[in-house]
């Protein structure tokens, strides 16, 4: 699926940047399967399929704050903040280093098999 956003706004640019970072960090291991937004107050949703492990990787933005989670086929979830102290502060979708940090920590947890899923 291709991310198509014709709107030029802070929210749309944040969403496009998050998508670009996901593709840059995960490469061919992910593909976009679902998205919506952006809507008012910088709210959007991006969902990817991570093929090597059959995981969903979900980026959600609410009022500019971004979170990322990994979900297995049972619906259990992992968030980088469960493992990495540096992921416990607020991350902003409009701040590239924040999106990079969450995405890189998520990739590290997956690649190094550090993920411990918790029931949703």
Image (cartoon, grey):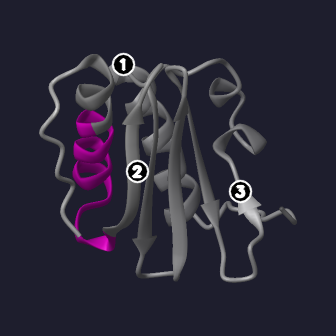
Inter-mark Cα distance, 1 to 2: 17 Å
Q: Which residues are magenta?
A: 16-30
Q: Nearer the viewer, residue 2 or 56?
A: 2
Which quarter of the rendering shows the N terminus? bottom left
Front tag of 2 and 3: 2
**Residue underneath mark 3:** 78
**Residue underneath mark 1:** 94
Say whether residue 16 is left or right of residue 67: left
Say whether residue 24 is left or right of residue 53: left
Quarter holding residue 119: bottom right
Q: Is residue 86 above or below residue 82?
A: above
Which quarter of the rendering shows the C terminus? bottom right
Q: Position of residue 108 (x, y in %)?
A: 50, 52
Q: For the residue carrying disc 2, how many other residues have a C-alpha within 10 Å: few (<14), some (14-19), or many (20+)?
A: few
Inter-mark Cα distance, 3 to 1: 23 Å
- State yes or no: residue 110 in magenta: no
Numbered-mark total: 3
Q: Position of residue 112 (x, y in %)?
A: 56, 62
Which sits earlier in the primary sequence, circle 3 or circle 1? 3
Residue positioned 32% across, 50% down in the render:
22
């Amino acid at each position: 699926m291709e991310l198509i956003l014709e709107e030029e706004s802070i929210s749309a640019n944040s969403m496009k940047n998050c998508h670009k970072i996901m593709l840059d960090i995960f490469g061919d291991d992910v593909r976009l399967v679902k998205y919506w937004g952006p809507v008012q107050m910088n709210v959007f949703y991006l969902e990817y399929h991570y093929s090597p492990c059959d995981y969903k990787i979900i980026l959600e933005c609410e009022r500019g704050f971004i979170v990322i989670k990994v979900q297995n086929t049972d619906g259990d979830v992992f968030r980088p903040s469960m493992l990495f102290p540096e992921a416990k502060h607020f991350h902003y979708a409009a701040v590239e280093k924040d999106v990079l940090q969450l995405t890189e920590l998520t990739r590290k947890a997956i690649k190094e098999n550090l993920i411990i899923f918790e029931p949703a």
